[in-house]
């Protein structure tokens, strides 16, 4: 939330899935358009809109790689969805056109190594979906080529928590370590650059 322009404003939630982020942003005070290519997902999102009494939330079926004729948005979010794009450059360029000048785009994506993870391979084989690596460096390069500016990066919070406190947010397990070991671990992680592999990217039009 701290990375977004403050509400109220028009927010585009791209690949919104079941709409939990869209409802969350709407409750925060944004006027939200949640979009997904899968009509079934939009049906789920409509249920969540009701469940969470999320006013200011419009839900639409559509392809984020082919946006056109939209009223300008103040901000846009790809939350765990850009890595499914057939052409992520087309998606980022389409959002660039949909933002007002000064508008902000945030991406929260799995980074390097995602496409070869067991979960991604299973999803590709079972559902025929696209699963790509979407590391911050790749997003940055495409965004700069498209014309975005002010690239910022914040490491994926789960990694920071895991390295700093030994808590694995996926398995909900904790490995207790002394402060010395934690400090050494964090120093090692900073040196090898693994915090740069995934996280939240922010760019401005
Ligand atoms: C992993 S889900 C994430 C959904 C949601 N953002 C969340 O965090 O729960 C990815 C979503 O992106 C959608 N998606 C994939 N390609 C898309 C496209 N070209 N245009 C719009 N949505 C797309 C999928 O249908 C799916 O609902």
Image: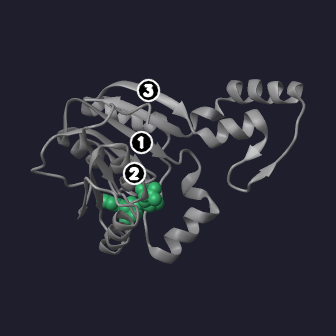
* Coordinates of residue 105 in the picture (x, y in percent): 33, 37
Mark 1 sits near ligand 1, with its Cβ under 8 Å away: no
Vertical relation: 69 (above or below) 49: above
Vertical relation: 120 (above or below) 175: below
* Type of colouring: one colour
Quadrant, the N terminus: top left
Spatial distance from mark 1 to mark 2, Cα to Cα? 8 Å
Residue at 88% in and 36% down: 177
The answer to whether the residue labelled 3 contacts the one labelled 2, judged by CB atoms less than 8 Å apart, is no
Mark 3, residue position? 152
- What numbered label is drawn on residue 54? none
* Coordinates of residue 186 in the picture (x, y in percent): 75, 28
Q: Name the residue nearer the viewer: 90 or 110.
A: 110
* Coordinates of residue 80 in the picture (x, y in percent): 46, 52
Q: Name the residue nearer the viewer: 174 or 124.
A: 174
Which mark is first along the chain, 2 or 1? 2
Which mark is first along the chain, 2 or 3? 2
Res 121 quadrant in image: bottom right
Mark 1, residue position? 107
The answer to whether the residue labelled 1 contacts the one labelled 3, judged by CB atoms less than 8 Å apart, is no
Residue at 35% in and 61% down: 53
- Quarter of the rendered image showing ligand 1: bottom left
Tell me the element at label 2: helix
Indicate which label's residue lies in the foreground, 1 or 2: 1
Spatial distance from mark 1 to mark 3, Cα to Cα? 11 Å
- What numbered label is drawn on residue 82? 2
Tell me the element at label 1: strand
Quadrant, the C terminus: top left
């Amino acid at each position: 939330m701290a990375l977004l322009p403050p509400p109220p404003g028009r927010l585009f939630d791209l690949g919104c899935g079941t709409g939990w982020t869209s409802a969350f942003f709407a409750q925060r005070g944004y006027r939200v358009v949640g979009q997904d290519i899968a009509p079934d997902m939009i049906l789920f999102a409509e249920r969540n809109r009701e469940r969470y009494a999320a006013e200011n939330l419009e839900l639409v079926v559509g392809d984020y790689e082919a946006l056109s004729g939209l009223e300008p948005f103040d901000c846009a979010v790809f939350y765990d969805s850009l890595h499914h794009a057939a052409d992520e450059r087309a998606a980022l360029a389409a959002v660039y056109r949909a933002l007002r000048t000064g508008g902000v785009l945030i991406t929260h994506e799995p980074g390097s190594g995602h496409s070869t993870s067991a979960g991604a391979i299973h999803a590709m084989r079972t559902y025929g979906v696209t699963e790509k690596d979407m590391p911050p460096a790749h997003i940055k390069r495409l965004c700069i080529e498209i014309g975005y500016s002010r690239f910022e990066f914040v490491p994926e919070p789960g990694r920071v928590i895991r390295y700093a406190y030994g808590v694995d947010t996926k398995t909900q397990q904790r490995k207790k370590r002394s402060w010395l070991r934690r400090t050494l671990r964090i120093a090692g992680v900073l040196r090898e650059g693994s915090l740069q592999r995934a996280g939240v990217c922010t760019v401005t039009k």
